Amino acid sequence: MKYVSVAIDGPSGAGKSTLARKAAAILGYLYVDTGAIYRTVALSAVRGGIDPADAQALVPTLEQLDIRLEYGEDGLQHMYLNGEDVSEAIRVHEISQHASTVSAIPAVRAFLLELQRDLARKNNVIMDGRDIGTVVLPQAQVKIFLTASPESRAHRRYLELQQRGQDTQFETVLRDIIKRDEQDTNRPIAPLRQAQDAVLLDTTRLNLEQSLQAILDIIRERV
Ligand code: DC
């Protein structure tokens, strides 16, 4: 492999995206948020009046789907759906659940696989998701499985939604996190699972700086 790939997998709200983004900025790697891609497919379904669970209706629309991933001047990943920047629209609470639903459809995963692998073929990447170390980039030089207790993940997600001005109850966020864990872990295709050669990092008792340091240490030891 010409470029370095770092795979970070784990359940929702473990801090993957914040930590991966910061680590990538420090190391000069491209940060790829693969959850955003599934979220864009979910948004496309909802906007098209398709039930995200209805594979038969959704799969034929994939070929016409114009999904692009671009990096703005701010260095951040932006998602484009049919030419429109949907980076904010995919962050609303209901899309999280729909993204988990569409991600269980095998044809959706197959459709998005090359898009993700192509980025790793052309860049040093830190890619986060659920199946990066197990399916998308099994040859990644560094694999990290990032987790934390459901309560601490729900707490972080809750604060994040509040900061975005979205009014949600903590209990709702916790319930949804548990439901998504269950869905993402138990689906038959590419379930959320720690790769055998991944390093487990539990951030329940670590703050952001400590978690970031732990990630950088793991990467620097291996690259
Ligand atoms: O990381 P996130 O919460 O933005 O991801 C949204 C959903 O997308 C998540 O519930 C499961 C799915 N997903 C996936 O199946 N595989 C990935 N590599 C990334 C996300």
Image: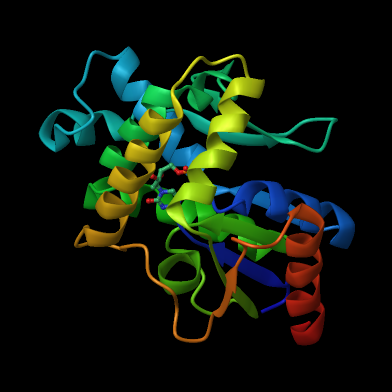
Position of residue 204 measured from the top left corner of the image (x, y, whole percent): 59, 60
Look at the image and tell me whether residue 79 can be seen: no
Q: What is the quadrant of the C terminus in the image?
A: bottom right
Look at the image and tell me whether residue 86 can be seen: yes
The answer to whether 74 appears left or right of 161 in the picture is right
Colour scheme in use: rainbow
The answer to whether 47 appears left or right of 129 in the picture is left
Instruction: Name the one closer to the observer, 83 or 198.
Output: 198
The answer to whether 96 appears left or right of 106 in the picture is right
Position of residue 99 measured from the top left corner of the image (x, y, whole percent): 36, 36
Task: Kindly indicate the quadrant of the structure image that contains residue 218.
Answer: bottom right
Residue at 68% across, 60% down: 126
Position of residue 215 measured from the top left corner of the image (x, y, whole percent): 73, 69
Task: Kindly indicate the quadrant of the structure image that contains residue 55.
Answer: top left
Instruction: Name the one closer to the observer, 17 or 189.
Output: 17
Q: Is residue 159 above or below residue 10?
A: above
Position of residue 64 measured from the top left corner of the image (x, y, whole percent): 34, 27
User: How many marks do you count on the picture?
Assistant: 0
Q: Is residue 15 above or below residue 70?
A: below
Residue at 42% across, 56% down: 113
Task: Kindly indicate the quadrant of the structure image that contains residue 96.
Answer: top left
Residue at 54% across, 40% down: 155
Residue at 78% across, 30% down: 72
Q: Is residue 25 above or below residue 96?
A: below
Q: What is the quadrant of the N terminus in the image?
A: bottom right
Q: Is residue 104 above or below residue 139?
A: above
